[in-house]
Every structure is written in structure tokens, then in C-alpha cells.
Amino acid sequence: MANAEFSLPIRVYIEDTDAGGIVYYVNYLKYMERARTEFLRSLGFGKDFIFNRELMFVVRDVAVSYRAPARLDDELQATARVQELRGASMTLQQAVRRGADTMAEGIVSIACVDRNSMRPRRIPEEIRHCLDNT
């Protein structure tokens, strides 16, 4: 696995902030979710591909460390990098940065599940192949 980092530009809008103009903590998780979604989309695996195969990727575990506050109108980068790829799960290293400064970073474990039964299932080979070569 080459472990390339995917990066998604994000602008902080008023609805992302608290009364002091600082990004509300839960929004960093939303930024990370967007980065994971766009990372898969960039590999050719958008929502249509996933839903047509009756699967879902669900967060199993998440650990986030908040390092510095992002503020209204900041230009951020939300990143995702595959750390580990297993049969029915993957672990990603993620971060939200403003330039060289890290605002938040985390490790997110994702499980691949059958959309109907919600039971674990293997990550499709097409996706595994692309993730192995990113």
C-alpha cells in the first residue's frame, strides 16, 4: 500500500462555528467524513457504486485529538490516508489542517457491512485493489 494522502479543501462557514466564531468540535468529524467520502469518490467508488452493491461503510471506532481552533472563514484541508486494510474493515489516519497547522487529527476504523443485514462483509475486490494502490 502506497499510503497516499487524499486532501479535500474546506471553507469554514458561520454554521460551522459557535458564538465565538470557533469551529464546533463535532464539525471536525463532519469534515473527516467528507474527506473519506470524496477519497472513495476520487477512486471511482461514489454512493451509486456502493449502494448498487448493497453495502455500506460505517464508522466502528473513532479517536480524535483536537490541537488548535479553526475559525470562521478559515481555509482548511481535511485529509484521509489508509493506515490498514483488512478483509471487512479499514483504518484511516485523518486530519484537518490550516496550512502547516493541525487543528484536529484522528484514527477512524470503518467496517464494510451488508446494507440489508448490517453484518460485516468483505470489502469488494475493486475497492481493495484501488486502496492497495493509492
Image (cartoon, rainbow, N blue to C red):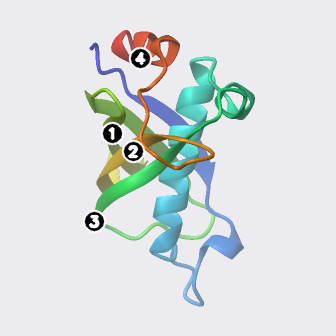
Report the Cα–Cα distance between label 2 and label 3: 23 Å
Local crowd size for mark 2, using a 10 Å CA cut-off: few (<14), some (14–19), many (≥20): some
Q: Give the percent coordinates (x, y) of residue 7.
A: 48, 34
Which quadrant: the N terminus? top left
Estimate the spatial distance between the alpha carbons at disc 2 and disc 1, rounded to whole Å. Answer: 8 Å
Query: Which comes sooner in the sequence, label 4 or label 3?
Result: 3
Secondary element at image label 3: loop
Please give the residue where the numbered disc 2 appears in the rendered image.
Answer: 110
Q: Is disc 4 placed on a helix, strand or loop?
A: helix
Which residue position is annotated with label 4? Answer: 128
From the viewer's perspective, tell me whether residue 125 is left or right of residue 108: right
Q: Amino acid at mark 1?
A: Leu
Q: CA distance from mark 4 to mark 2?
A: 13 Å
Task: Give the mark, 4 or 2, whose residue is nearer the N terminus.
Answer: 2
- In this rendering, position of residue 1 left or right of residue 8: left
At 51% from the left and 77% from the top, the residue drawn is 24
In the picture of the structure, the residue carrying the numbered disc 1 is: 92
Residue on which the image places disc 3: 67
Which of 46 and 115 lies nearest the eye of the viewer? 115
Residue 57 pos. (x, y %): 51, 42
- The residue depicted at 63 percent of the width and 27 percent of the height is 41
